[in-house]
Structure formats: structure tokens, C-alpha cells
Image (spheres, rainbow, N blue to C red):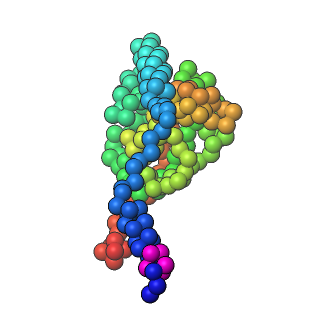
């Protein structure tokens, strides 16, 4: 091996050794911006909207001396139009149910009628059907043959986005639902569970 090759090999080895010995340093942004201000402002705005809606719904309930309202664990109110205390069956996860409902503004002015919407078929908590969370949760409180009117704050309805030109953003709603039937889901066999 001649001196030139030896020198070249020594330089490459030295360069490789030096470049591998130093750990890369993380790069830091020149200017840091935080989205926490906007996030916190959004939270405060939503809390204010929720409080206003809750206050208004409570005022409506207090003004109604005819009906007995119930508060759900999910944060909406409801009253029975038709109650069936003899039928103990209510929907469970996976059950196939048929129901009808309408949508009204919080004061009861109808937006979409039962006829507009038609009878719905829904697999409880397993369907991709576009139902607002309030309706999905309300159905689980019902028994076959019952009709219940629900009062939903906007976060249990269509929230910030509203609905296709029918319902504006942050709009609390009423919905009267009739549960027509429940087809209980069959328990899975050991073979189907695998």
C-alpha cells in the first residue's frame, strides 16, 4: 500500500470517527407560539353557551306546571307523553329498534316532522347511523310503546355545526320520540366470540 492510499484511508477513518462521536443537537424554533390561549378561550365560550342554554331550559321547565320533568345522567331533560310501566324491556347494546321522532326548537316549533324523517331502524350503539348523541342516549331510557319528549342542550344535539340549513349552530332542541319495537340481539356463541 502506498503512502497516498494510506493517508487517504487514515483521513476517512478519522472523519468517520469524528462525525460519529458527536450526538445531534435538537433544533429549537426561533419563536414559540402556543395555541393554549385560543383553546382556553374556546372552552370558556362553550361553558358560557352551555350555562345560558341550561338556564333557559330550566326556566321553560319551571314555567310548565303540567308535566313532570326528569334530568338524565347525560345532561338533558325529558318528560313522558305516554308511559308504559308494564313493559320492563328497554334497549341494550346491539338490539335492533324501530322508532319515530321529530325535531323542534327548544320552544316546540317543529323543524322536521315525524313524517319528514320517517320510521328509523337503529342497532343500539353499533350503527353508523347519524343520530345526535341525545337521541342515542334517550332511546336507552325508553320502553316499547312509550313516547317521550326530550329537551337537549346544543352539545347533545348538533353542537357548533348545526344541521344542513335546518338548524343553526349552538341550538338547543326538543325531540319527541316513540319507541315502536325492540328486537333483542342474540348472544354470541363461543365460536362467534373467537
- Give the residue at the far bottom of this rendering: 1
Q: Quadrant of residue 104?
A: top right
Front residue of this view, candidates 184 and 45: 45
Quadrant housing the C terminus: bottom left
Does 119 sit left or right of 30 as displayed? right
- Give the residue at the far left of this rendering: 190
Q: Where residue 81 appears, x then y in whole percent? A: 46, 31
Does 103 sit left or right of 32 as displayed? right
Q: Where residue 162 appears, x then y in whole percent? A: 60, 33
Magenta stretch, residue numbers: 4-8
Task: Name the residue located 47 percent from the left edge and 33 percent from the top edge.
Answer: 32
All told, the count of numbered labels is: 0
- Residue 122 in the magenta stretch? The answer is no
Task: Name the residue located 36 percent from the left edge and 27 percent from the top edge.
Answer: 70
Q: Can residue 64 be seen in this view?
A: no
Check the image and report above or below for 76 versus 144: above
Q: Where residue 177 appears, x then y in whole percent? A: 50, 38
Amino acid at each position: 500500500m502506498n503512502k497516498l492510499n494510506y493517508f487517504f484511508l487514515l483521513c476517512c477513518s478519522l472523519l468517520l470517527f469524528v462525525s460519529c462521536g458527536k450526538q445531534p443537537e435538537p433544533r429549537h424554533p426561533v419563536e414559540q407560539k402556543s395555541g393554549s390561549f385560543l383553546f382556553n378561550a374556546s372552552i370558556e365560550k362553550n361553558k358560557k353557551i352551555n350555562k345560558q342554554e341550561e338556564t333557559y331550559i330550566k326556566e321553560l321547565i319551571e314555567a310548565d306546571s303540567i308535566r313532570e320533568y326528569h334530568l338524565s345522567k347525560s345532561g338533558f331533560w325529558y318528560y313522558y307523553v305516554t308511559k308504559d310501566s308494564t313493559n320492563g324491556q328497554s334497549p341494550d347494546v346491539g338490539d335492533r329498534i324501530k322508532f319515530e321522532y321529530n325535531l323542534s326548537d327548544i320552544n316546540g316549533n317543529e323543524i322536521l316532522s315525524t313524517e319528514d324523517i320517517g320510521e328509523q331502524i337503529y342497532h343500539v350503539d353499533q350503527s353508523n347511523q347519524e343520530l345526535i348523541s341525545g337521541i342515542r342516549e334517550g332511546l336507552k331510557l325508553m320502553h316499547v310503546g312509550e313516547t317521550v319528549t326530550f329537551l337537549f342542550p346544543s352539545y347533545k344535539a348538533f353542537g357548533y355545526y348545526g344541521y344542513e340549513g335546518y338548524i343553526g349552530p349552538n341550538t338547543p332542541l326538543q325531540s319527541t320520540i316513540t319507541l315502536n319495537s325492540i328486537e333483542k340481539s342474540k348472544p354470541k356463541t363461543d365460536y362467534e366470540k373467537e
